Amino acid sequence: MFIAIYGSGGHAKSIYNLIKNKKKIIFFDEKKNFLKIGSEIFSIKGGIKKLINEKNKISHVVIAIGDNKIREKNYKILKKKFKFATLIHPKSNCAYGVKIGDGTVVMPGSLINTDSVIGKNCIINCNSSIDHDCVIKDHTHICPGVIIGGNVTVGKNSWIGLGSKIIQNCVIGDNVFVAAGSVVIKNIKSNSFVKGVPAKYDKKKLAKF
């Protein structure tokens, strides 16, 4: 049985690095025929229909797509047919009491502290830090270098940008985009785009997001 990686971009390369038995990996994607990782070239079997057709060969699936909404869409399709792999890099640190949902990937150098709960189909990217008693809800992407204080809640489908910071006890709504390098010091309502130090709402970019 194989682990199927759905996606063939840079994130797929990172996920490939998380799977110990690399001989048991097959790639699927709608647009590409091959994927080059280092000196190796991997054939791509086909799109989501091909993946479903080969379900008898697949033990688990992981979605290698950075875009939250696309990742969520494909998760909802594939969860009807497959089990999802939860991948945690050995050079990450998940403390006692941490819970991590199906399909989530935890990248190297990341820290998830005691009693935090990470939802399904999330990306906890390299060198991010999530302190104690946080809740990160489904399909959210915590980008590299993010620092999140204790007792923070981040809603579904949110994007916490590269190197941004969220102080303790904040509540971030669903579908929130926190721009890279921002510092969040208060609650952020759902369907918002925030940026800056301290982070403020950007109404011009809200509709686009």
Image (cartoon, helix red, strand yellow):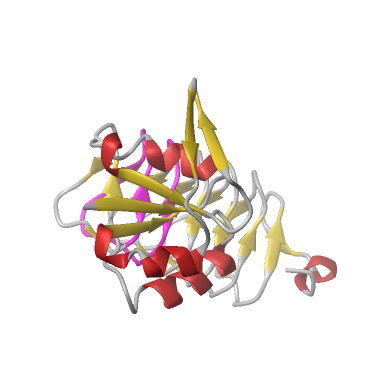
Q: Residue furthest left?
A: 96
Residue 179, image x, y percentages: 67, 53
* Closer to us: 118 or 203: 118
Quadrant location, the C terminus: bottom right
> Eyeballing the image, is 34 above or below 101?
above
The residue depicted at 43 percent of the width and 36 percent of the height is 127
The foreground one among 156 and 63 is 63
Residue 59, quarter of the rendered image: bottom left
Look at the image and say whether residue 118 sits in the magenta stretch: yes
Q: Is residue 60 left or right of residue 31?
A: left
Which residue lies at the image location 54% right of the left edge and 46% below the top edge? 8
* Percent position of residue 49, x then y: 48, 69
Q: Which residues are magenta?
A: 103-127
Q: Quadrant of residue 15?
A: top left
Q: Residue 200: in sight, yes or no?
A: yes
Q: Position of residue 147 (x, y in %)?
A: 46, 45
Extreme-top residue of the structure: 39
Residue at (63% x, 54% y) in the render: 31
x and y, in percent, of residue 55 in the image: 31, 66
Does residue 116 show up?
A: no
> For this rendering, which residue is in front, 36 or 68?
36
Please say whether residue 147 is one of the residues in the magenta stretch. no
Identify the main secondary structure in magenta: loop
Q: Is residue 74 above or below residue 45?
A: below
Query: Closer to the camera, 47 or 183?
Result: 47
Horizontal side of 22 relative to 16 (left or right) equals left
Q: Is residue 11 above or below residue 173?
A: above
The furthest residue to the right? 204
Would residue 78 be found to the left or right of residue 20 on screen? right
